[in-house]
Amino acid sequence: MLRMHFTAGDVARTRVADGPDPFWESVLSLHKVWERRPEPDLTGWRRRVVQNGRASLRLLLPLVPARGYFPDFLTPAASAEGVEAGLDALLSTPRRELRDQIGRLATSGPPLGGWVRSVAEGRAPALRQLGEALRDYQDIALGPSWQRIRARAESDRTWRARVQWCSGTDAMLRTFGPGIRWCPPVLEADYPVDRDICLDGRGLLLIPSYFCRRTPVALADPTLPPTLVYPVSPGHPVRSPATGAPATTDAVGTHLAHLLGHTRAAVLQALGGDCTTSELARRAGVSISSASEHAAVLRGAGLVSSTRQRNAVRHSLTPVGLALLDGSPSQAPSEPSAPANRFRTQGC
C-alpha cells in the first residue's frame, strides 16, 4: 500500500494536472507492450505498435521493465510545458542521476546492455538515440490516438477540478475510490509495495492517465515533486484509442448539444474551475477566437463569468452553468468534437 501524508498546506497545494502527460503515457504504455494478453481495447493498438515501432522498442523496453522500478528521469516534470520541454529536461539529466537511477534498475532486473550503460554514463550519442527513440515511439504509440487519449483524461480532470472548485480539495480527494482512498490526513492507494511519502508542505500533483490501468504510480525518488498518476475513470463517456468507437453515452452531454449546439456545449463542458481563453480553446478543440466568441455568448446567458487578469481573460462557470452541467453529478463531460491534430503540436 502507498500512503501519502498530508499537512494542511499540502491540501491547499494539491491540484489535478490540466491533461495527460505524454512521457507518463509513453512509459505506462510500454508496460502494455510487454503484456502477452493485453486488455481487449488495447489489442489492436499493441499490434500496431509492435509492428511499426521495433527500432524504438528495442532501445526503450530495457529501460522500462514489465514490472517494478523504472527510472524517474523518463518522466520529467518539465513535460508539463510540452513535449519539447520534456525532452530537453530528460536529455539534460545530470550524469549522477542517470548513473544512480540506471544502477537501481540494474539491481532489480536482468543485466543491462551496452547501450543502456552508455546512457548511464551520460554519453552524448546514447542520449541522442534515447531522444530519437522517444520521439518515434510517441509518434507511433500515442500520435494517432492522442486526441482521444487527451479527451478522456481532460474529461476526468474537468470533473474532478469542478468538484474541487465547488466543494474543496477534501471532497475532490474522495472521488478516486476504491483504489485510492482519502483518510485524512493520509491518501492511501493500492500499490505493489508498502511505501510512505511525506509531502511536507509540497502539495501533490495528480495526473490523469489512460494507460495507467490497475494501480496508481508515483515517482520513486521522494525528493522529487510529489506526483501521483492515476487511472482515468472507466465510466467517463469517451472513445477507444484503439477503435475510435464510442465507449458510453452521456445523456447530459446529448441534451446540452441539442440546447446549445455541439461546439458551444463542448466549450461549456470544457470549463472546470477556471481557465484562460487559450486553455479553454485547447480543452474544447477549437480556435482561440472561437473559444472567445462562445464564452461571450455563454457569459451573456449567465452560464459563464469572465475576469481579466493582466494580459489574460479567465473564465469560470457560474452557479447556473454548474447546475446545468450537473444534471447527472456522477458523470463527467463527454468528449468534445475536435479536429485532429498532430501529436507533436499538442501540449500536455
Image (cartoon, rainbow, N blue to C red):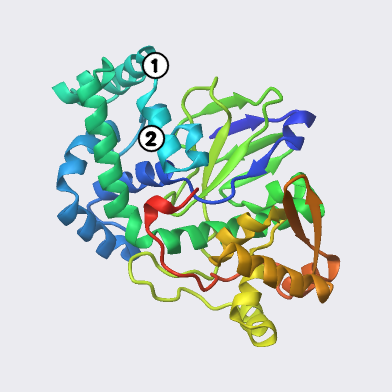
Q: Which residue is drawn at the image coordinates 84% and 72% (left, top)?
A: 302
Residue bearing mark 2? 87
In the image, farthest residue toward the top: 96
Name which residue type carries label 1: Pro
Q: Is residue 332 visible?
A: no
Task: Tell me where residue 138 appears, x and y as whole percent.
Answer: 32, 48
146 on left or right of 81:
left
Residue bearing mark 1? 94
Helix, strand or loop at mark 1:
loop
Task: Tell me where residue 141 appears, x and y as whole percent.
Answer: 30, 53
Q: Residues within 10 Å of mark 2 (few under 14, many from 20)?
A: many
Q: Which residue is drawn at the image coordinates 67% and 42% (left, top)?
A: 15
Name which residue type carries label 2: Leu
Task: Tell me where residue 329 appears, x and y as whole percent.
Answer: 72, 68
Task: Tell me where residue 38 appears, x and y as whole percent.
Answer: 29, 57
Q: CA distance from mark 2 to mark 1?
A: 14 Å
Q: Which mark is residue 295?
A: none
178 on left or right of 323:
left
Answer with the quarter of the image where residue 30 lies: top left
51 on left or right of 17:
left
Helix, strand or loop at mark 2:
helix
Looking at marks 2 and 1 on the same chain, the residue that comes earlier in the sequence is marked by: 2
